[in-house]
């Protein structure tokens, strides 16, 4: 019997999704698709305890996420975005996504795709918002 989640064969689900955003002082947020569910972890920074949970987004949520990623322009991101001489309080991020026609593997340190100066860009913010929305969309059916 095939135990893949419903929708994988139609391209509804990604082959790979890993997202991470973190800063030592401000905490971190990560989501990793394991082929069956999203594994979500969040920390508050410093010595504050973190949380982890498993999420199974609905087909509607996956479709919304995919459209948001396309609209953000993330499909053209690649490589490493970094401030040449970063130091303390650096914000690190990673996006590794493979989904039929979308393939993105990039990371950064204080710099974000589409920006000339340190700081989050609108395109990156759109992906972050889409990942966070996906992580709030739990549906045990898929």
Image: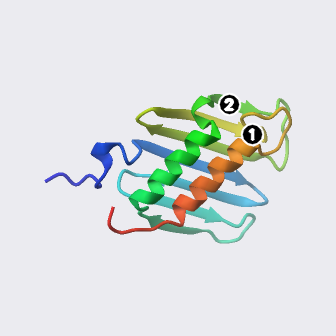
Residue with the most extreme left position: 1
What coloring was used for the rendering? Answer: rainbow
Q: Secondary structure at mark 2?
A: strand
The CA distance from mark 1 to mark 2 is 8 Å
Q: Secondary structure at mark 1?
A: strand
Please name the residue shown 26% across and 52% down the image: 4
Please name the residue shown 57% across and 33% down the image: 75
Q: Which of the pair 136/73 is nearer the observer?
A: 73
Quadrant in the picture for the N terminus: bottom left
Residue for badge 1:
109
Q: For this view, does 84 lie left or right of residue 32?
A: right
Quarter of image, res 10:
top left
* Count of all numbered marks drawn on residues in the image: 2
Please name the residue shown 62% across and 28% down the image: 78
N-terminal of the pair, mark 1 or mark 2, is 2
Residue 125 spot, x, y in % from top left: 70, 49
Residue 101 spot, x, y in % from top left: 44, 32
Q: Is residue 50 above or below residue 2?
A: below
Please name the residue shown 79% across and 42% down the image: 110
- The reply to whether callout 1 and callout 2 are in contact (CB within 8 Å) is yes
Residue 83 spot, x, y in % from top left: 82, 33
Q: Which of the pair 66/138 is nearer the observer?
A: 66
Quadrant in the picture for the C terminus: bottom left
Residue 72 spot, x, y in % from top left: 64, 41
Q: Is residue 94 above or below residue 24?
A: above
- Crowdedness near tag 1: few (<14), some (14–19) or many (≥20) residues, C-alpha within 10 Å: many
Residue for badge 2:
80
């Amino acid at each position: 019997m095939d135990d893949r989640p419903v929708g994988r064969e139609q391209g509804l689900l990604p082959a790979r999704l890993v997202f991470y955003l973190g800063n030592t002082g401000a905490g971190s947020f990560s989501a990793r698709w394991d082929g069956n569910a999203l594994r979500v972890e969040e920390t508050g920074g410093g010595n504050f305890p973190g949380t982890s949970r498993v999420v199974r987004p609905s087909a509607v949520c996956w479709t919304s996420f995919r459209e948001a990623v396309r609209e953000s322009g993330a499909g053209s991101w690649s490589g490493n975005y970094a401030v040449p001489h970063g130091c303390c309080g650096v914000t690190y991020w990673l996006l590794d996504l493979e989904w039929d026609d979308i393939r993105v593997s990039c990371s950064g340190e204080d710099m974000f795709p589409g920006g000339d100066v340190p700081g989050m860009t609108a395109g990156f913010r759109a992906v972050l918002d889409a990942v966070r929305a996906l992580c709030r969309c739990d549906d045990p059916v898929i």
